[in-house]
């Protein structure tokens, strides 16, 4: 057996070792993240807990994938380094549960996924050598292993719950109770993942065969996608690019998804080397069509991203799109050059390019996983500059993104805007800063829009006068003028008044409609609608609840108690006010 190949004999202890490592790692992660807090409302763990869990998880998974009998200490060291680097990066980025669901983490995990097959190849050769066939084969094998392990976990948990239900039938509830504990689920999860990985690694020949079956199945799809992409590109001169922007706002993600599909399927056709390359002419031409389509798709995606940035400015998502478009363009150029140089033998030129680009993507991905290049800072500065320059109005500015999507730089920019010399910007920034959720900020915009549109359908009596925004903003509630843009409304209001009364046109229409014929089984009911009252306190307006009154004074409470005991209960006529329309009373009297 040469130095550059794996051991030809099995390692029966490996499934046990990996099952044990997986179980302990999963239990450690569960214990670190189990902060004994209620699930609702959700409470984010401290940043160090997320970082430690990430370090344990990535280190253990990397070690399990990289472990071989030969140079096992290399795998241990590699797993420790990956875990340490991952944990430090996540801690550096900060954040709670969202630290695992952002582009930084995606970039980090992409870098790790590329680094693992490179390490596996170097480990097998015992040197810094990366034959393409070995690297490509390890990468595809890892993908198959990943999917197979998750499938095995699903089967294990399904079996566990089936056995728990079976034991419940005879009054044995121990397994059901165990499955309700997080620590037991973590042990079962980790042991299942590690054990499945070890068992499959012990059947390396079957695993390689399964990997070839997967790539062969995928290769069949290459002509389909290749023909579709060519038809799409050939149709563009006739349809024009404008149709792309009009059809959807997701042009760039769709095009980049096609690029990823083209890269996967074309590499499934060309295989790890010449001996594994598909010989069917249809599959070969399909792969060539895919390779030819990558660069035009990347260019169009770049144009779409540029247009969005020009129209709406920078955001973290758009900057990440720029990065992905850059990767796609690099692949597109490399594949086009390989086609020009090699023609039918283009795969011999593209394989080395794949390897070189993989190193670049892993390095850039690791860099972008850190906060060194802060897309949040760049986006915040650009969006604020657009606002202050008047390129976007205060009403149309995305305040929610600045407050909740751009991280600490966005919050810092919001505080600076609250001190802006522009009073409109400063007022809106101060209002937004008090909100705890993006829906609250959206409510500000809806309130502003509804209050502005109310002017067009509002009749003010006894004289037409401007209505302050504070009053208009509360008039649009369902008991007042409502937010229905077709519903006219009448307001009794005078400048400086402390009280206002409104009645909607829909209420008048309801009252003037002929009532249905009453029957003993279904008596006619009067309409419950009426006028709504609003009272000013300082500069704020609020609707007056007719059923509410101030608490009784101590003297009133004493008199009420004494009168009830003495039976002094009577009915008195008291003065009251009421809304009249055309001399007809509307609604109930009020004080």
Image: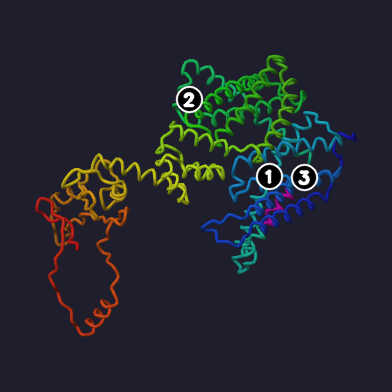
- Image quadrant holding the N terminus, namely top right
Quarter of the rendering containing residue 252? top right
The label shown at residue 244 is 2
Q: What crowding class fits label 2: few (fewer than 14 Cα within 10 Å), some (14-19), or many (20 or more)?
A: some
Residue lying furthest left in this view?
A: 583
Residue ID at (76%, 25%): 273
Q: Is residue 186 above or below residue 92?
A: below
Judged from the image, the secondary structure of the residue bearing numbered disc 1 is: helix
The stretch drawn in magenta includes residue 231: no
Earlier sequence position, callout 2 versus callout 3: 3
| Number of the front mark, 3 or 1 | 1
The stretch drawn in magenta includes residue 188: yes
- Image quadrant holding the C terminus, namely bottom left
Residue 332 is situated, as x and y percent measured from the top left of the image, at 64, 22
Residue of label 3: 81
Residue 529 left/right relative to 244: left
Residue 392 is situated, as x and y percent measured from the top left of the image, at 43, 33
Earlier sequence position, callout 1 versus callout 2: 1
Judged from the image, the secondary structure of the residue bearing numbered disc 2 is: helix
Q: Nearer the viewer, residue 251 or 288?
A: 251
Distance, label 3 to label 1, CA atoms, is 12 Å
Q: Is residue 180 above or below residue 131?
A: below
Residue lying furthest bottom in this view?
A: 566
Residue extent of the magenta highlight: 186-201
Distance, label 2 to label 3, CA atoms, is 45 Å
Residue ID at (28%, 73%): 552
Earlier sequence position, callout 3 versus callout 1: 3
Q: What crowding class fits label 1: few (fewer than 14 Cα within 10 Å), some (14-19), or many (20 or more)?
A: many
Q: Nearer the viewer, residue 350 or 475?
A: 475
Distance, label 1 to label 2, CA atoms, is 38 Å
The label shown at residue 89 is 1
């Amino acid at each position: 057996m040469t130095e550059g190949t794996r051991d030809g004999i099995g390692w029966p202890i490996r499934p046990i070792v990996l099952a044990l490592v997986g179980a302990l790692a999963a239990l450690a992660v569960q214990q670190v993240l189990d902060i004994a807090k209620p699930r609702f409302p959700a409470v984010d763990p401290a940043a160090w807990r997320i970082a430690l869990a990430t370090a344990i998880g990535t280190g253990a998974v990397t070690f399990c994938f990289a472990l071989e009998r030969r140079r096992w200490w290399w795998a241990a060291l590699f797993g420790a380094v990956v875990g340490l680097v991952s944990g430090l990066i996540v801690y550096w980025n900060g954040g709670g549960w969202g630290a695992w669901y952002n582009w930084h983490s995606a970039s980090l995990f992409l870098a790790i996924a590329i680094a693992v097959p490179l390490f596996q190849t170097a480990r097998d050769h015992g040197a810094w050598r990366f034959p393409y066939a070995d690297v490509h084969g390890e990468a595809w094998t890892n993908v198959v292993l990943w999917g197979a392990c998750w499938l095995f976990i699903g089967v294990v948990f399904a079996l566990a719950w089936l056995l728990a239900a079976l034991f419940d039938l005879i009054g044995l509830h121990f397994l059901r109770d165990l499955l309700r504990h997080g620590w037991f689920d973590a042990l079962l999860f980790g042991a299942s993942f590690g054990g499945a990985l070890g068992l499959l690694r012990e059947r390396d020949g079957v695993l390689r065969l399964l990997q070839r079956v997967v790539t062969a199945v995928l290769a069949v799809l290459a002509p389909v996608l290749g023909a579709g992409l060519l038809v799409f590109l050939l149709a563009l001169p006739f349809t024009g690019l404008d149709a792309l922007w009009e059809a959807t706002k997701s042009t760039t993600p769709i095009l980049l998804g096609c690029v990823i599909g083209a890269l996967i399927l074309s590499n499934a056709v060309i295989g790890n080397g010449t001996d594994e390359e598909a010989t069917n002419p249809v599959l070969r031409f399909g792969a060539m069509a895919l390779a030819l389509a990558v660069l035009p798709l990347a260019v169009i995606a770049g144009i779409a991203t540029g247009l969005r940035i020009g129209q709406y400015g920078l955001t973290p998502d758009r900057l990440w799109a720029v990065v992905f478009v850059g990767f796609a363009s690099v692949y597109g150029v490399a594949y086009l050059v390989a086609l020009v140089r090699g023609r039918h033998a283009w795969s011999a030129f593209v394989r080395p390019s794949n390897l070189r680009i993989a190193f670049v993507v892993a390095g850039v991905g690791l860099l972008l996983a850190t906060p060194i290049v802060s897309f949040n800072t760049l986006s915040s500065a650009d969006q604020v500059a657009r606002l202050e320059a008047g390129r976007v109005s205060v009403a149309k500015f995305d305040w929610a993104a600045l407050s909740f999507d751009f991280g600490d730089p966005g919050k810092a920019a919001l505080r600076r805007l609250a001190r802006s010399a522009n009073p409109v910007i400063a007022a809106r920034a101060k209002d937004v800063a008090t909100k705890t959720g993006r829906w609250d900020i959206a409510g500000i915009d809806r309130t502003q829009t509804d209050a502005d549109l109310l002017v067009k359908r509002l009749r003010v009596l006894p004289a037409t006068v401007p209505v302050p925004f504070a009053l208009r903003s509360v008039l649009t509630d369902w008991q007042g003028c409502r937010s229905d843009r077709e519903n006219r409304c009448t307001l009794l209001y005078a400048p400086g008044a402390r009280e206002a009364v409104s009645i909607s046109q829909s209420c008048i229409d309801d009252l003037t409609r002929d009532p249905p014929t009453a029957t003993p089984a279904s008596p006619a009911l009067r309409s419950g609608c009426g006028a709504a009252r609003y009272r000013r306190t300082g500069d704020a307006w609020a609707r007056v609840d007719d059923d509410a009154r101030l608490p009784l004074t101590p003297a009133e409470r004493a008199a009420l108690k004494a009168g009830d005991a003495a039976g002094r209960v009577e009915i008195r006529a008291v003065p009251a006010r009421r809304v009249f329309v055309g001399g007809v009373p509307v609604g109930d009297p009020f004080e």
